[in-house]
Image (cartoon, rainbow, N blue to C red):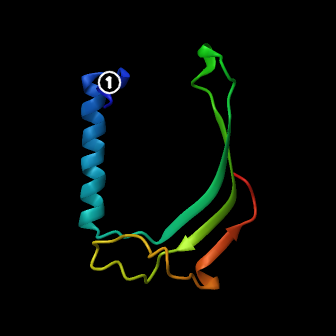
Amino acid sequence: MLSKRGATQAEVDEWETLVREMIQVVQLKQLVPTMRTQYMRTAFQIPFDLRCHRYRISLDSNLLLISERGYDTQGGAKWFRDPDKTLADNEITLFPHAV
């Protein structure tokens, strides 16, 4: 996929090495998610300008931090909460600023 975007073989190899190292650290340290975020993203860019298509400004608002601690992940087979279960008030934190 990276080579289709014009990346060199060295860049592709470097990326694959980084991904393998990240997976290894997650598995070795048995890391699990402890927080999930939800937000509304607004993006701005200059329309129809082929020279500036790379530049984009994003603004995230209505940011929620949702606790994943202590949630039953079925032995690691599932990393997310059941969307049908109600969250307790102390499991959601509203971040009062846009980022």
- Image coordinates of residue 6 in percent, x first then y, are 35, 20
Vertical relation: 52 (above or below) 33 = above
Residue 59 or residue 27, whichever sits in front: 59
Residue for badge 1: 4
Among the 4 quarters of the image, the one containing residue 66: bottom right
Among the 4 quarters of the image, the one containing residue 8: top left
Q: At label 1, which amino acid type do we have?
A: Lys
Residue in the image at 50% along x and 81% along y: 85
Residue in the image at 59% along x and 85% along y: 88
Dot 1: within a 10 Å radius of its alpha carbon, few (fewer than 14), some, or many (20 or more) residues? few
Among the 4 quarters of the image, the one containing residue 64: bottom right
- Image coordinates of residue 97 in percent, x first then y, are 75, 59
Residue at disc 1, secondary structure: helix
- Image coordinates of residue 27 in percent, x first then y, are 25, 64
From the viewer's perspective, tell me whether residue 24 is left or right of residue 41.
left
Vertical relation: 21 (above or below) 80 = above
- Image coordinates of residue 32 in percent, x first then y, are 37, 70
